[in-house]
Image (cartoon, rainbow, N blue to C red):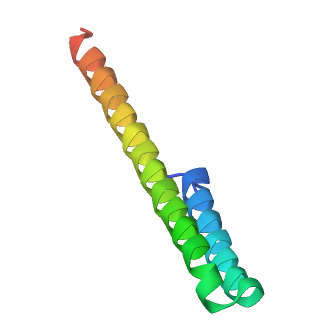
């Protein structure tokens, strides 16, 4: 099975993590130490939730592809 050179889920994961870290640093700069802490926690929680959702999407796609490949192989075995 050939791998695509561009994976949109990986690009989303990298982009969301970069955006989250930029937001955390910006919050620290703009709001200052103690005022930024709760918002940084919310941002970190959102980053983790988004990463988990992308991991589940990747797992779903991988399992779907495996089932499709198994179905194709089973169909090929049935042909005379």
Seen from the viewer's position, the closer of residues 79 and 70 is 70
The quadrant the C terminus occupies is top left
Q: Position of residue 12 (x, y in %)?
A: 61, 57
Q: Is residue 52 above or below residue 35?
A: above
Can you tell which quarter of the image residue 77 is in?
top left
> What residue is at 64 percent from the left and 82 percent from the top?
35
> What residue is at 48 percent from the left and 51 percent from the top?
54
> What residue is at 29 percent from the left and 15 percent from the top?
75
Q: Is residue 49 above or below residue 30?
A: above
Judge whether residue 2 can be spotted in this image: no
Q: Position of residue 9 (x, y in %)?
A: 56, 52
Q: How many marks?
A: 0
Q: Is residue 54 left or right of residue 62?
A: right
Judge whether residue 25 can be spotted in this image: yes
The quadrant the N terminus occupies is top left
Can you tell which quarter of the image residue 40 is in?
bottom right
Looking at this view, name the residue that lies furthest to the top.
Answer: 80
Can you tell which quarter of the image residue 63 is in?
top left
Looking at this view, name the residue that lies furthest to the right.
Answer: 30
> What residue is at 46 percent from the left and 62 percent from the top?
48
Seen from the viewer's position, the closer of residues 30 and 52 is 30
Q: Position of residue 18 (x, y in %)?
A: 64, 73
């Amino acid at each position: 099975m050939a791998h695509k050179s561009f994976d949109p889920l990986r690009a989303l994961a990298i982009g969301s993590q970069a955006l989250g870290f930029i937001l955390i640093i910006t919050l620290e700069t703009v709001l200052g130490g103690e005022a930024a802490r709760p918002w940084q926690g919310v941002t970190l929680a959102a980053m983790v939730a988004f990463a988990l959702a992308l991991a589940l999407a990747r797992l779903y796609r991988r399992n779907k592809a495996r089932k499709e490949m198994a179905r194709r192989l089973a169909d090929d075995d049935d042909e005379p």
